Image: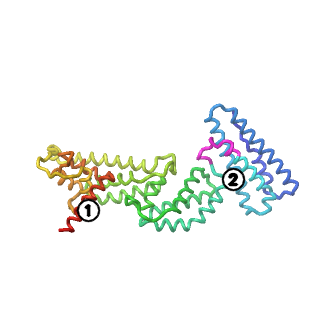
Amino acid sequence: MKRSYVYHWFDSLIYEQTDRQLIPAEIEGLSVQLREEKRRIQQEIRDQVFQLKEETHSRHLINMHYNLLVPVLDRVSDMRLQNNGHSKANGGGLQLVESALTDILVFLENEFPNYLVKEIQVPLIRLIPVRQEVSGKMGALIKKLDNAGINKEPARIIKEFLEGFLARIDARNSITLHELEYTLAIVEDIERMNTKMSSNDCEQLHELLIYWNLNTQATVDYFLAGKDQFLAGCETVEQKLEFYRYELMKLKQIPEKPGFVYDRKYPSLKSYFTKYILQEIQYLEKKEVEFAPIKTAKKGYEPLKQKVHVAVSADQIALLLRAADDVRLLLSKSMRAIFHAVVPYLSTPSKHDLSPDNTRSKAYAAEVNDKKIVIDFLQAMIERIQAY
């Protein structure tokens, strides 16, 4: 069955008479017409829905009527705003028409709440108050963003996103309910934000881009540019691998706001960059094997018979060696070289022969209990040294 456009009467009314002054008698007559037309449209929509057997068809129908209604309502709201809300505009019927159209909108929302999707358009009458609210907060928001970290690029990305949202309202561009709710949630998070660093040494704004899944092109370009800048200083494949493994570890620790992603046509930032980093690691590991010296590759790894027995696990050894490299207690061309120089000479209570590379990989996924055990040993050593 063909679904007809139900707002023709309102289109004609807006075009013909809402821009002129109406006398009281005409206003009363218009009010009666609006009530009758509103009831007619509501009943027609109900009839159309009841004739459909499939819920997916009903959902499509309701969203279609909603999205066709919003531009009609926006036309009236825009005309009223251009008249600056003066009494002449009200006398001309704009406010009456806007109220009737809003009632139909509310009817769709209340009668069919489970059918409406987040991609429905938001009418101008609801966007204008939001624009005023966000615009009034922009000064405080920008100040908070500017004070949130040394790197100004994440702050710039977020500021431009919020300014772009306001500009879209001014330009009367279509804005979906999802985009509105997403933006307001970001504003609320910024207002609650403090300026301390995150637990994994990322600047808070840097981490928030992942947390919010602000998967715009500007965000993706920012992270890729940072990656390229760091890799430019890496001289070896091993250094690049260490960088990617460390970034992967940090990325896994950053939470995502549940069900929160800006552009739902594309994957989340965490999903996208996790896949990207894993592919880069796989490529570099293959490259590292291909360029390994023939003699070393042929000989392979030979366990040593005489070893130092260490009273901790391989995971805890990995933490100790990584920390020793970070504070420059052990000096070598790379952390991999340290592990290959030290680990073959060690054994643990549960394993006699340790693989240097397998042990090193555990340094990037430390568990809380392993950290506690290592810290306890180090604290005991500090106390012993102080007593010497």
Vertical side of 130 occupied by 64: above or below:
above
Q: Main secondary structure of the magenta part?
A: loop
Per the rendering, the mark at residue 53 is none
Q: Residue at x 74, y 38 (%)?
A: 44
Question: What span is in magenta?
Answer: 107-120
User: SS at mark 1?
Assistant: helix
Rendering coords of residue 277 (x, y %): 36, 49
**Viewer-nearest residue: 249 or 225:** 249
Position of 61 with respect to 162 (left or right) is right
Q: Residue at x 21, y 59 (%)?
A: 333
Identify the residue under disc 1.
379
Look at label 1 and name its amino acid: Gln
Position of 53 with respect to 94 (left or right) is left
**Viewer-nearest residue: 359 or 227:** 359
Look at label 2 and name its amino acid: Asp
Rendering coords of residue 177 (x, y %): 60, 50
Label 2 neighbourhood size at 10 Å, few (<14), some (14-19), many (20+)? some
Per the rendering, the mark at residue 74 is 2
Is residue 154 highlighted in magenta? no
**Dividing the image into 4 quarters, which one contains the C terminus?**
bottom left
Vertical side of 127 occupied by 60: above or below:
above
